[in-house]
Image (spheres, rainbow, N blue to C red):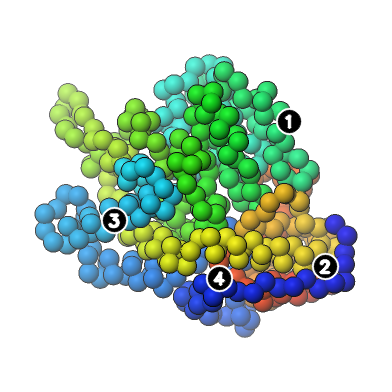
Amino acid sequence: MSKTNSQPTPPAIPEALAHVRGDFPILSRTVHGKPLVYLDNAASTQKPQAVIDAVTRYYSHENANIHRGVHLLSTEATGAYEEARGKIAKFINAADDSEIIYTRGATESVNLVAHSYLEPLLQPGDEILISAMEHHANIVPWQLLCARTGAILKVIPVTDDCDLDLATFDQLLTEKTKLLSIVYVSNAIGTVNDIQPLLDQAKARGIPTLVDAAQAIQHIPLDVQKLGCDFLVASGHKIYAPTGIGILYGRRALLDTMRPYQGGGDMIAHVTFEGSTFKEPPSRFEAGTPHIEGAIGLGAAIDYLSSVGLPAIHDYESQLIAYAVAKLSQIDGLKIIGNPRVRSGAISFTMGDAHPHDIGTVLDTEGVAIRSGHHCCEPLMKRLGVPATARASFSLYNTPADVDALAAALKKTALLFL
């Protein structure tokens, strides 16, 4: 990408987002004496006061186990837990609240589908189709499943620009394909995949689909009924909610056919020493005491995003990341990895021979927090010919001033390494 001396125009912060930085207490702190510039949002987002308050309120006023008790605290906790499920269902336009299963995160959600849905259906030689830009969480569970069943993992390649290479998609999607599992937004590069035609083609051929929306749900309005996917996974901690909570959306007709993922309390209908019967979804897949405060916090995060408006967030973040690409493109020695048709959330880059960990360390001294490494995408890094990258990732509370601080810190880094 050629350098230019013309200065890009920073986007204006829309009125709907003007207040948001003040809603996140951590953004007021300093790091090494510098104001915190948090650009590691693809790894985990910060939490608004509304989410912190919801978790605190649960522990201060409602703390009890759910579903089993008839006393007031248990009733209140159960109500808050299930109310959050309804908020999530509405947020992604699920047909029914029962299509939302709480998990520990997107990783567990993928593993649940592998174990409970796909494994009983596979025969040796069957195929699972993913892409070359998947997070390890959408690779390793399928590899383990293939090792257990004799199935084969197939991979849609990516172009040098880091878009999906769809020239081979028609050949890869065959009568042997038993699942298409595809990422919506790349956590490493920020590529927004045009997944709708892929999902439509799979659906037309009776092939079930899973969408990894861990990097999409916080940036792009989602409608699972419009997408027509059979499963969708996401993690709470990437959508301003607590860690250790996530969701699996599953089409109810499929959930009804699936075996339990784990056994134990609250997923059973009846137990005898001769055998057990199990509840209907979603309870069938939520064994044991769940992450109650995490679910309540996730519900509060959904409320917060809904109050700001995801369309406004998406529009602003798109402008902000375009501004960041323009600013970083002006820095001598810096190479942005990938040039996808549509980018959201993240920019990966290298600087000459400087190791990404060294870049991240220098930026930290300037108060700028980024991520360095392979971003749980080692196969993608190998495809692109780099061992690792530095990655800046953005959210609704980032500003053009954050981008300017990143660019200034990177110019200082260039003086040390280039």
Report which residue position mark 3 lands on.
Answer: 83
Report which residue position mark 2 lands on.
Answer: 331
Looking at the rendering, in which quadrant would you find the C terminus?
Answer: bottom right
**In the figure, is residue 230 to the left or right of 268?**
right
Location of residue 390 (image quadrant): bottom right
For residue 244, above or below residue 139: below
Which residue is painted at 14% across and 53% down in the image?
Answer: 69
Which numbered disc, 3 or 2, marks the residue that appears first in the sequence?
A: 3
Which numbered disc, 3 or 1, marks the residue that appears first in the sequence?
A: 3
Location of residue 173 (image quadrant): top right
Which residue is painted at 17% across and 57% down in the image?
Answer: 75
Q: Residue 102, which numbered label?
A: none
**In the figure, is residue 296 to the left or right of 198?**
left
Residue 110 horizontal/vertical position (percent): 47, 39
Q: Residue 167, which numbered label?
A: 1
In front: 281, or 8?
8
Which numbered disc, 4 or 2, marks the residue that appears first in the sequence?
A: 2
Kind of residue at disc 3: Glu
Mark toward the viewer: 1 or 2:
1
Report which residue position mark 4 lands on.
Answer: 397
Which residue is painted at 65% across and 31% down in the image?
Answer: 155
Kind of residue at disc 4: Tyr
